[in-house]
Image (cartoon, grey):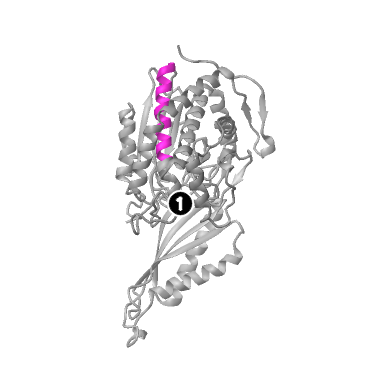
Amino acid sequence: MRYSRWIAGTLLSLTSMGIPHTVIAADPQGDELANAAAVLAQQQQSAGIALADEIWNLAELGYLEYRSSGALQRYLSENDFQVETGAGGIPTAFVASYRSTGADESDPVIAILAEFDALPGLNQAATPFRSVAQEGGAGHACGHHLFGAASSTAAVALSQWLQANDVRATIKLVGTPAEEGGSGKVYLARAGVFDGVDVVLHWHPGDGNSASPSSTTSNKSGRFTFTGRAAHAASAPDRGRSALDGVEAMNYMVNLMREHVPQTARLHYVITDGGDAPNIVPETAQVYYYVRHPDRDQVVELFERVVRAAEAAAMGTDTQVDVEVMHGNYPVLPNHTLAQLVNDNLVAMGGIEYSAEEQAFAETIRKTLISPRRELGSQQRIAPYQPRQSMGSTDVGDVSWLVPTVGFSTATWVPGTPAHSWQAVAAGGMSIGHKGMGLASRLLAKSAAQLILQPDVIAEAKAELRRSQGPDFVYAALLGDRKPPLDYRK
């Protein structure tokens, strides 16, 4: 029979966090039933490891993750999910859905996010010392191979749990490409992929275990391409106009800006094209900028200042500049109602225990880290529950402004390891990464099951989202109406 117990109990106030809302206390019988979903997720661990290792070895870049995306789709399809490919007009994006027997639109719809793109130039073997397996190759330095695999195994476990317990709901695994600078989720959000979803769950690899409500910075990026006039740099420099001069003039002015921006702002750039040879006045040159701030309106304002610096640089060097907005992300909007539920589950599950071999690996890799912020052994613990502000960015932010969203991190890397490092690639390719991934899969499955059993918690999470949005909120993507930059990593 369908499980229909509604949760009742003490209402716990979280107004001390600055957002008035309530959380409904857990019901022991419901918790026991939800635990069965975590057990099913554990049974998928071997399949998850195989998926993660396959994607780790492929290490495909954003919007080019055809085989990685395909591996997840095959696994989900083999487990009775209906897979829609090309979601949002993106070839490697997909939505895999499972609707239990008798379920309809009135029953809960839970979406779980799955990432799978790698980073350029960070290829690394699964060793505790620097060892490049493929010179110049990509690497999973942000652990998205683990992200995609854990989310997928959790989704399959939930589908099995729904059927075994005659519970009505829909599970959606949303395959989201190009998180690293490609804003894949923004295009999916803009296309309505999350319409009709009640709650979104996600997670991220890390060097510790935390389910605290956290936000990120908003982010907008652009490529600034200067065009000048080529000439012989020695015999006819007066007849040339250097596009590289335009880039350097722009960078100089933006660097002067740094004294006059909010302290929580971040500006970073890389010159992607500086010319072809010293004896040729560069006809084209390009610089790629990221602008970040916790407030999306501030990001828009700062980006416009960077654009004005580029226009001034072009005027001063008698060149032209073209600005292409590459991506834009909202800051993550925390949902305390959901975060408390997930945190309680994470505390109950506990952290990560290393074997003797894993401990030796961790001790060796720790010697390569500079000023690690976490001590070895912290992977066994759960970070205290408290709101946090990250200076990084993620395209999960846009999703969180549209649907109640909750995320967490688990210790898939050696404590003290920074993201986007070879050390993260190394741990993610061996059992330390696999253990953190397994914890994430179990936590996703149990938390989603609890939410399905507690429609009043879902209702409160939605009410909190509406309060946080404010009465005048209208979603508009920071990247405008541009099409997905499918070739940005080519």
Q: Look at the image and tell me whether residue 418 can be seen.
A: no
Q: Main secondary structure of the magenta part?
A: helix
Residue drawn at the location 69% of the way across and 37% of the way down: 16
Helix, strand or loop for disc 1: loop
Circle 1 Cα neighbour tier, 10 Å, few/some/many (<14 / 14–19 / ≥20): many
| Picture residue at 30% right of the left edge, 43% below the top | 67
Determine whether, in the image, residue 123 is placed left or right of residue 361: left
Vertical side of 243 occupied by 162: above or below: above
Does the stretch in magenta take in 149?
yes
Q: Amino acid at mark 1?
A: Pro
Task: Report x, y in % for residue 261.
Answer: 59, 62
Count of numbered badges drawn on the protein: 1
Q: Percent x, y for residue 292?
A: 53, 55
Q: In the image shown, does 106 or 163 lie closer to the viewer?
A: 163
Residue for badge 1 = 128
Residue 37: x, y in percent? 46, 24
Q: Nearer the viewer, residue 376 or 260?
A: 376
Locate residue 96, reporting x and y percent.
35, 32
The relative height of residue 360 versus residue 343 in the rendered view (above or below) is below
Residue range in magenta is: 147-166
As for residue 466 lying within the magenta part, the answer is: no
Residue lying furthest bottom = 235
Q: Residue at x 60, y 66 (%)?
A: 259
Which quadrant holds the N terminus? top left
Against 314, residue 488 (above or below) is: above
Question: Does residue 152 appear in this view?
Answer: yes
Camera-nearest residue between 258 and 153:
153
The residue most toward the right is 16
Quadrant (top left/top right/bottom left/bottom right) for the C terminus:
bottom left
